[in-house]
Image: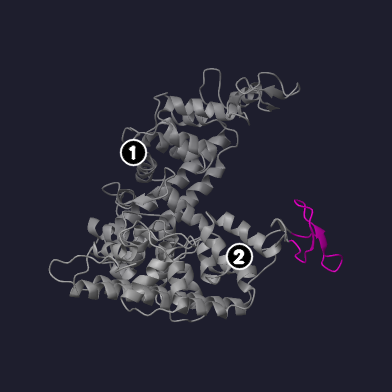
Amino acid sequence: EGLLWAPASPSGTVSEQRLLRTILQAIVRQATYDEEAEDAKAWLRPGAGMCGLPAFFKVLDGAGKGYVLDTDLLQIMKDHETSASFASLCALIHEADIRRGGGITGRLCFRDIGKMVFPADSKEYRAMVEALNDNEAKSVLYLLRFTEPCPRCGMRIQRDKESDVCPNVVCSSCKAPFRCFTVGRPSLDDGIVASAADRFSLQKLVAAAARTAENLEMDRKRLAALPGFDSTTLETVYNYISSGRKFFDFGDLREALRDQHVPASEKELDLIWHRYAPGFGEGVSKEGFVRHLRYEPTWTPEMNTATNRLLKQVLQTVMRQAVADCGAEDAKAFIPKGCPLTALFRCLDPMDKGYLIDTDLFQIVQDFRGKSSFASLCALVQEIQLRRRYDQIVAPGRLGFREFGTLIFRQGSKEYEALRKCCNDAEAKSTLYLLSNSEPCPGCGLRVQRDSESAGCPEVTCPKCKTSFRALCVVGDRTAIRQSFEDESGASRLSVEARSQLHRTIAAAAQAAEELEKDRFRLAQLLGYDATALSDVFNFVAQGRSNFTLPDLRRALTHMEIKASEKELDMVWKRYAPHGGATVAFHDFMRQLKPLTQGLGGP
């Protein structure tokens, strides 16, 4: 009872009361915009949301990435010739991040699409809000759709027979008999495909949600531009609603609106509570309140300062690097299967120096009268060393055993990944020996090998965890294979055919390295190209952040209308994030695009 707590103002309360009323009116306007988005959900046919949510998600995520980007939303807009701006689609994803309460992800997950499809007062919407991940959301949605609760204990029950037999069932928990007409299915998206009408309805729903998100973002922007509005204003308004407490409830919000004479219907109050208290009945914290009203401008392509010509040239260079890497990877299939890396290394290093230089590579090219130039081999050595980790110390112009292994083994193979993690050549040789002459224990992962023939009993027991399993790797067999490529002193005795295949692999890699370096030189000769220009391109891909992810790169390519296959995108990511990282920083981006040498005879 009594007057609500009001903020003190040493210079007068008129301006503060006006600002307080304006912010409360902005909260009600958010409910009005949310009501428009809720009304748009009626465009979906009855039952389409629950049955067709996986199908709708597949429509938006045609590549099967597991998430939806703003470019995916733009594609469905283009398919139906809908005039939805790209900025509104970016605002839609930003709004989903705000409603989710986590960090800015720049993507829509399965739960976000579910919130867009299901009405806010439905049990399916609540399941999308309360689920911790997409798998849990799909499981709960399956239970809601294909099971019925027991009227006595609430246990979910489904029938595996058709309803025309006998609908009477008995609960397996409390033994209560009741009639169940729900027939189970193998999965949530079993045989469901979105029709043309469903795709059109989904497009209208996305367009309406994008308009709502854009209006919400513009309202936050107008609010932030009010005279007297600063970082403490929202906290002051929150303290007014909560009367100085840590949380406020539905009654506090209703009383604050009534006290400031801000009209709001019951439906608008419900939508406000759905927005600010997603936990359904829990109080509203200060962080959640400020998050929904604070203006955080989202990045749009119009903010970028780089020209479209420069953006397209750089991104096309990135994709040509992927094409060259794919060709070099395909050439690795020429290497004889089972040939030890030590034998291949000794073939190129007959003097046993412990490393390879460009003249060693040039020697095998001359032996087979190849057409690879000496400059391309120099570029190959630099290109291999470009993939090294920052903590690895290498001698310029020299390829160690580890680096030579990255030239021979396919990216993604267990040998390639093992060599990438090794600190020196001795560790690399030991690791390769374990991979080829032992098997991991399924219990603890300890490497185990057998010193008897396979004709005996293949059952072994791990000396560490005592797990019994079948070990088919026999040291004697591996030794015989190694002796077919090396003599007793360890010198290589590769056949002419094996040496020829090694030469083909090196020639293909050298040609790819030469093309990559020429591409870098052509890029460096563009008008206006410098480190600042690369920074602008990086800013475009990363959307103003300090690093970018694979979805960011996919979005940038789509925006510039540059086509890329999944294999090419995978090769780009392995080049720019070679250490298995989830993000690419600016120094990694620039390192792959600036020329490595002073010249290759001109581009």
Residue 115 horizontal/vertical position (percent): 52, 67
Give the mark nearest the N terminus, 2 or 1: 2
Residue 121 vertical position relative to residue 204 in the rendered view, above or below: above
Number of disc labels: 2
Name the residue type under label 2: Pro
> Which residue lies at the image location 31% right of the left edge and 54% below the top edge?
546
Magenta part of the chain: 158-184
Residue at the disc numbered 1: 390
Residue 467 horizontal/vertical position (percent): 66, 25
Q: Quadrant of residue 554?
A: bottom left
> Which residue lies at the image location 62% right of the left edge and 29% below the top edge?
439
Cα separation, mark 2 vs mark 1, equals 43 Å
Q: Residue furthest front?
A: 1
Q: Quadrant of residue 253?
A: bottom left
Query: Horizontal placement of 262 versus 505: left or right?
Result: left
* Magenta-drawn stretch contains 170: yes
Residue 219 seen in the figure: yes
State which quarter of the image contains the N terminus. bottom left
Residue 160 horizontal/vertical position (percent): 79, 59
Name the residue type under label 1: Tyr
Query: Horizontal placement of 488 versus 275: left or right?
Result: right
Residue at the disc numbered 2: 54
Residue 34 vertical position relative to residue 572 in the rendered view, above or below: below
